[in-house]
Each structure stands twice: as C-alpha cells, then as structure tokens.
Amino acid sequence: MIIIALLFSAILMWQTRPRHYSPRWFRTRMLLYVGVTAYGVVPAVHWISLNGGLQAQVVQVMTIHVRNRKMSVSEENMFASRNSAQNSWIN
C-alpha cells in the first residue's frame, strides 16, 4: 500500500507543477504512469498464472464476475456527467 501511495503522490506532484510540463520531464511522467498501471496488471497476471491460466474454472468465474459487475450509483453519476459534458462540447 505504501508503494501505491508513493506512486500516486509522485504523479500528483509531477502533474501539478508547471515546470514538469516540459519535454524534459516526459520520460519521468511516463514511467510513473507505467508504474501505476503495472501495479494493477502484474498481480492480476500473476494470479491467473498461479491458478492455472485462463482456462482454469476459478479464473473464468472471476472474469465473468468482474465483467458483469454492476456500477455503483456514484460510478453511474460520474459516467453520466462525463458523457454529458463531452456531448455538450460536441453539440
């Protein structure tokens, strides 16, 4: 948990300071984004491999469960407001 807190803190620091917008800091910003993404993807791939791959029953059940997950009310509101803002810009 400490690692993810440090990654997000670093990302916020690099995104909120104008001096980090320059091309000089591009590689650092990309490495931070890749780090945050890898923090979620690598454990998922590891779990799949430990459980026998994509053909394992437990992996298929969890995949179906994640795909069919219902959005919470706050997620639905966020999605709706983001779409309406994008649509109002287009129209």
Image: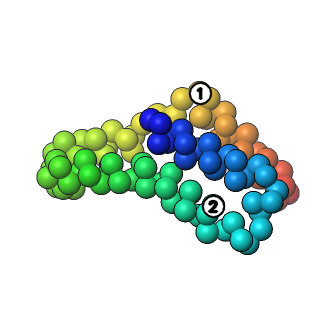
Which residue in the protein does label 2 denote? 29
Q: Secondary structure at mark 2?
A: helix
Is residue 4 toward the left or the right of residue 19 in the image? left
The one nearer the camera, 54 or 37, is 37
The one nearer the camera, 85 or 29, is 29
Q: Is residue 67 above or below residue 33?
A: above
Q: Quadrant of residue 6?
A: top right
Which residue in the protein does label 1 denote? 73
The one nearer the camera, 54 or 20, is 20
**Residue 33 placed where, x, y %?**
56, 57
**Residue 3 placed where, x, y %?**
47, 42
Please say which color scheme the image uses.
rainbow
User: Of circles 1 and 2, which is in front?
Assistant: 2
Is residue 26 toward the left or the right of residue 31 in the image? right
Q: Is residue 89 above or below residue 61?
A: below
**Residue at position x 39%, y 53% in the image:** 41
Image quadrant holding the N terminus, namely top left
**Residue 66 placed where, x, y %?**
37, 41
Total number of numbered discs in the rendering: 2
Tell me the crowding category of disc 2: few under 14, some 14 to 19, or many 20 or more residues within 10 angstroms, Cα based: some
Q: Residue furthest top?
A: 73
Is residue 72 toward the left or the right of residue 22 in the image? left
**Residue at position x 62%, y 48% in the image:** 10
Q: Secondary structure at mark 1?
A: helix
